[in-house]
Image (cartoon, rainbow, N blue to C red):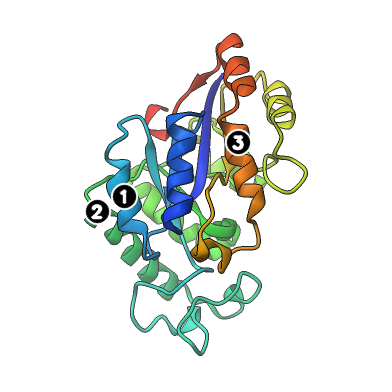
């Protein structure tokens, strides 16, 4: 098996960024995705340049912070912030999504790094209209996309080379080493597997912007545990990022 352990939310805050890098340096994370509309995105991107085997993809955002594009009225509330996950698709227009994602992609490139793949905050690209725009970027730049539902499988097979995605390692009850190992056992016949995670340290910025908090620190502990590293070594599981598939 070839395993990608991808840490979401790179750049959402300095503490989260440092936690992800700890999970890379002393754990099993080989991939992460950058939130380009966040204040600490450039900080994260610059740090990532010190780690050649850390793949950095783009984490397209429509549901946190502010947009990078101007006049994206269908995407924002009265304060100029992105609308919540439950409201965004009620008003979103595809031309505004395309404009915003282009701004985020250009911002990513301005940091002097190239994305390895595409996913999105809160899996917003599961929405058909958003998925259509994401596919445009995928085709133009030849980038794999994280699979988020069965409807996308056929369209993604060629781009993702058979990659299977699981978000089961996420949540209050599922972040122990035993559960992670059980996921590997469950998918032992899979050639390529991606497991999403959210390891982090905590700071004021993430405390004020997320409800998923202490679980992030527990994920960090799990992803750097000797038990998991030993299991991966003993079972000849190869840790990779999207640049390697």
Q: Position of residue 46 (x, y in %)?
A: 27, 48
Q: Determine which of the numbered discs, if any, sits on residue 45 in the image.
A: 1
- Ranked by sequence position, the earlier of labels 1 and 3 is 1
Q: Is residue 129 left or right of residue 111?
A: right
- How crowded pointer 3 is (Cα within 10 Å; few <14, some 14-19, many 20+) is rated as many
User: Is there any visible trace of residue 10 in the rendered image?
Assistant: no
Q: Position of residue 99 (x, y in %)?
A: 36, 71
Q: Determine which of the numbered discs, if any, sits on residue 147 in the image.
A: none
Name the residue beneath numbered marker 2: 111
Q: Is residue 174 left or right of residue 32?
A: right
Contact between marks 2 and 1 (CB within 8 A): the answer is yes
Q: Does residue 97 lie above or below 163 as drawn?
A: below
The mark closer to the camera, 1 or 3, is 3
Contact between marks 1 and 3 (CB within 8 A): the answer is no
Q: Position of residue 91 (x, y in %)?
A: 56, 81
User: As rendered, which of 145 and 51 lies closer to the eye?
Assistant: 51
User: As rendered, which of 190 and 16 lies closer to the eye?
Assistant: 16
- Ranked by sequence position, the earlier of labels 3 and 2 is 2
Q: Does residue 17 lie above or below 124 as drawn?
A: above
> Could you give the CA–CA distance between mark 3 and mark 2, rounded to whole angstroms?
30 Å
Quadrant that contains the C terminus: top left
Name the residue beneath numbered marker 3: 221
Q: Position of residue 53 (x, y in %)?
A: 35, 29
Quadrant that contains the N terminus: top right
- SS for dot 1: helix
> Could you give the CA–CA distance between mark 2 and mark 1, rounded to whole angstroms?
6 Å
């Amino acid at each position: 098996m070839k395993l990608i352990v991808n840490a979401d939310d790179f750049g959402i805050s300095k503490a989260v960024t440092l936690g992800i890098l700890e999970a890379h340096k002393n754990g099993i994370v080989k991939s992460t995705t950058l939130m380009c509309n966040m204040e600490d995105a450039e900080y994260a991107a610059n740090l990532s340049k010190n780690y050649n085997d850390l793949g950095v993809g783009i984490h397209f955002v429509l549901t946190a912070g502010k947009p990078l594009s101007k006049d994206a009225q269908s995407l924002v509330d009265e304060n100029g912030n992105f609308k919540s996950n439950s409201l965004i698709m009620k008003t979103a227009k595809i031309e505004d999504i395309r404009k915003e994602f282009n701004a985020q992609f250009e911002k990513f490139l301005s940091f002097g790094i190239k994305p390895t793949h595409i996913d999105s905050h809160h899996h917003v690209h599961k929405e058909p209209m958003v998925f259509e725009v994401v596919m445009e970027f995928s085709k133009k730049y030849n980038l794999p996309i994280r699979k988020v539902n069965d409807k996308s499988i056929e369209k993604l097979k060629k781009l993702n080379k058979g990659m299977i995605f699981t978000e089961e390692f996420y949540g209050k009850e599922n972040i122990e080493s035993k559960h992670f190992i059980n996921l590997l056992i469950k998918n032992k016949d899979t050639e390529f597997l991606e497991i999403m995670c959210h390891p982090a340290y905590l700071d004021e910025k993430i405390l004020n912007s997320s409800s998923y908090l202490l679980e992030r620190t527990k994920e960090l502990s799990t992803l750097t545990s000797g038990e998991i590293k030993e299991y991966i070594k003993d079972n000849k599981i190869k840790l990779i990022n999207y640049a390697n598939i």
